[in-house]
Image (cartoon, rainbow, N blue to C red):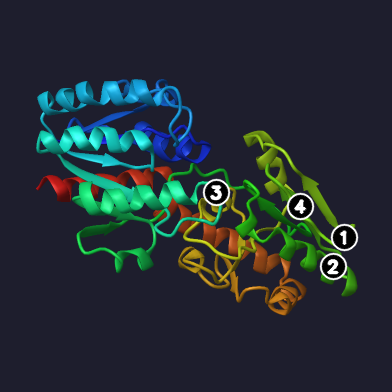
Amino acid sequence: MKVAVICNSSNAFFLNYYSSLLENVNDERIVFLGNRVFKNKGNNTFKTISYTKNAFLDFYSIFDLFLSFFVAIYLKTQKVSIIHFVSAHSSNIFLSFFAKILNIKIAFTIHDLIPHPDKKSSFVDLYNKSIRSFFGNYFVVHNREYEEAFEKDVFYIPLSGYKSDSLPRNLPKTILFFGRIEPYKGIKNLYALGELFLKEKMDWNIIIAGKGKLPVYDKSIPSNIEIINDFISDELLRSLHLKSAFTILPYDSASQSAVIIHAYAYGTPVIVYDVGSLGEYVIQKETGIIVKHNDYNAILKYLKEITVNDYKKLQLNIANHFSETYSDKAFAKDSIQLYEKWLS
């Protein structure tokens, strides 16, 4: 019997997340299928089964629907007993319908059980209700809080999958926000923090890097804040980490976030607000700090007291923890162990 691991999403995060499995899992009991963007991502056994360009319905969804019937039959002939969908996508529903008819079990990774308050929230909510009510036999989650929300079999794997590219630094006086700009990510909180840096005469700067609509602010943006409101390439992101001491997640709401793991991959400690399950991914004062929502005083106090030696210890802790728990190889190992459990 086999497990089919499927990623129909072409989202930039999943390009890395799923590719880490393609490149690090070599087991004849595990087959890979998904969106056409993964065709040349390190696994010769990969087969393309989705042509859509986003998780919503688009022109190619009709083709995906037609193709799903034949994909289900193909998986049955290949003795696949479990399908694992690692991303939310409309095409998953099409294939799940036909797979259920053929008595193939279905597993879903749920990244956002409670959708973020954005334009995709209604789709994600409908998708989650559908897979929980009609299709799912197993569920995979990336935070402990979600484990309690399921009556059916639920399995936890740490959110992971990045390659290490640790960048040694000597405590540069810059804090970095990176990722797509969304209303729930608290950009205004960074404006307030920048104002406090100036008020306290602290020579710390903030970089906000990411594409998306910036919030309206009724004052001028503090002079110690640099904004790069555009798509951030891998090369640019690496250079931004090289000149930043911390990555900050000043979110107003959250589940877990790949931003933390991505920061760790560069050896960058994090400052995170204690919202959602962000704190699960931070060891207090060993890989960064967790502060209460908008507890600016805690951030200021920490930055005033930290030394270069303290910072180097943080980077060493991150390197060790990342290798063991959050690297691409760790993700592949955890996934294989899970599939062995399902197949046993």
Local SS, label 1: loop
Which residue is more in the foreground, 2 or 284? Answer: 2
Quarter of the figure with the N terminus: top left
Three-letter amino acid code of the residue under disc 4? Ile
Q: CA distance from mark 2 to mark 3?
A: 27 Å
Q: Position of residue 126 (x, y in %)?
A: 37, 50
Circles 1 and 2: CB atoms closer than 8 Å: yes
Chain-order first, disc 1 or disc 2 = 2
Q: CA distance from mark 1 to mark 2?
A: 6 Å
| Mark number displayed over residue 262 | 3
Q: Is residue 201 left or right of residue 85?
A: right
Which residue is more in the foreground, 135 or 180? Answer: 135
Local SS, label 4: strand
| Mark number displayed over residue 137 | none
Q: CA distance from mark 1 to mark 3?
A: 27 Å
Q: Position of residue 282 (x, y in %)?
A: 51, 66
Circles 2 and 4: CB atoms closer than 8 Å: no
Chain-order first, disc 2 or disc 4 = 2
User: Circle 1 is placed at which residue position?
Assistant: 222
Q: CA distance from mark 3 to mark 4?
A: 16 Å
